Amino acid sequence: MFSKVLIANRGEIALRVIGTCKRMGIATVAVYSDADVRALHVQEADEAVSIGGYTPRDSYLVIEKIIRAAKDTGADAIHPGYGFLSENAEFARAVAEAGMTFIGPTPEAIGMLGDKTAARELAIASKVPVSPGSDGAVESFEDAIKVVNEIGYPVIIKAAAGGGGKGMRIVEHEDEIERAFMAATGEALAAFNDGRVFIERYIVQPRHIEIQVLADEHGNVLYFPERECSVQRRHQKVIEESPSTAVTPAIRKAMGEAAARLVQAANYTNAGTLEFLLDASGEFYFMEVNTRLQVEHPVTEMISGVDFVEQQLRIASGEPLSIQHADIAEPKGHAIECRVCAEDVFNEFLPDTGTIKFMQLPTGEGVRNDSALYVGYEVSVHYDPMVAKLVVWAPTRAECIERTKQALDNYHLAGCKTTLPFCRIVLEHDAFVSGNYSTFFVQENWPLPHLPETLKIVTAAAVGGAVLEEQRRTPISN
């Protein structure tokens, strides 16, 4: 096992990795930008190294700075977290060339599965279902038109080199295709320095389902019960749950086995996630592979009892998986994750900034807070607006919904607007409660034209309750 691990990340995921390393007796090294001098991950790590800069481009995305910090502190491994350099094959290769272990898949696996067109081709070869579409990236708009004429509308245009909703456009009619194609290629080029796109038939009213996998260096592959990630806006997930109300045991088995086949074909090791679309008839189609730990991994941790960061560390150090499929084949209870993002949900989810003036996080049975927030924390424009995650477990889905609503009612932040009101309203909505929803949930149901009176109260509490509490605690000066 490693003696010292550098975490090439920030925020709640850096704290998440530090926590497991401490439990396992592994020393940790944090890196931090000029904007993160007072960050909690800097305080919690055994050592911390400044890498300067304020923006990711000047700090957390500079491979040379990360490698130098690891060498200077004697780290023997680097954990990338998610985002930033976590799916960068060049970074994984640089770590290995520096004589350290990259806690993740090999550069070859990242390169193969991180490119969506290559991953799609491998999926086809592995008999994993894919939706009809282009044979690799399309070379021009004229080629795009040929593909669309063959498969018909609606279609989805996707960036070949990245994810997160960047370079993605849904096209329903012929008069939209040229504008959407140009917008997708331009956005892909700006986000990933690679303007290639490919085209697939768009599945109407799909469910977004993903399968978490673990694979060791000894040929063992485990797949876990699914996560439902259909509550999303602009292709960004907001609420996830496990298990899905739309997945039967038979679908779970078929989807898991398909994920395992693709992972084995790629000689993949460590943690990863395969994303699928599920249609109303129960047919599923491969979308992409995330060659890293997912933001929503705590959902699966809660229903399986497995610490995925610990498993990542053990796999990367050469240990075989000690977990058996029978241990994790069936979900144990139900879990829901709410992403707490610094966004104004009543103003098109626009990012918000500010300094946290008051904070009160929910507690209780089955409640988990993954957060790097503290009073005085500055929510800036430099980083992703997600500032925390609320994860809740209960024996049944109905109990989990009620427990999550209670936790949201007791979650107070003052200093910036967040997605807390949105999450609370979703959990009250008939479509979510029934489990009969799709990736169109937000598009069809938000904003609500008229908030029920009870939800007005809840929303006011989520937005302003913390401010009132702060005012109550602040002495009145003469």
Image (cartoon, helix red, strand yellow):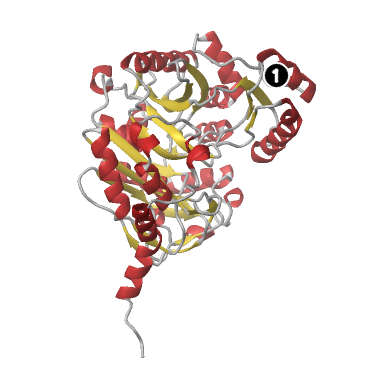
In this picture, is 62 found above or below 137? Answer: below
- Quarter holding the C terminus? bottom left
In this picture, is 123 found above or below 303? Answer: above
Residue 345 locus on image (x, y percent) = 49, 51
157 relative position to 70: left or right: right
Query: Extreme bottom residue here?
Result: 478
204 relative position to 246: left or right: right
In this picture, is 236 found above or below 171? Answer: below
The answer to whether residue 46 shows anywhere in this view is no
Residue 171 locus on image (x, y percent) = 66, 28
Q: Nearer the viewer, residue 81 or 414?
A: 414
Residue 411 locus on image (x, y percent) = 32, 55
249 relative position to 439: left or right: left
326 relative position to 299: left or right: left
Q: Nearer the viewer, residue 411 or 204?
A: 204
Residue 375 locus on image (x, y percent) = 37, 65
Q: Residues within 10 Å of mark 1 (few under 14, many from 20)?
A: many
- Quarter holding the N terminus? top left
Mark 1 — residue? 148
The type of residue carrying mark 1 is: Val
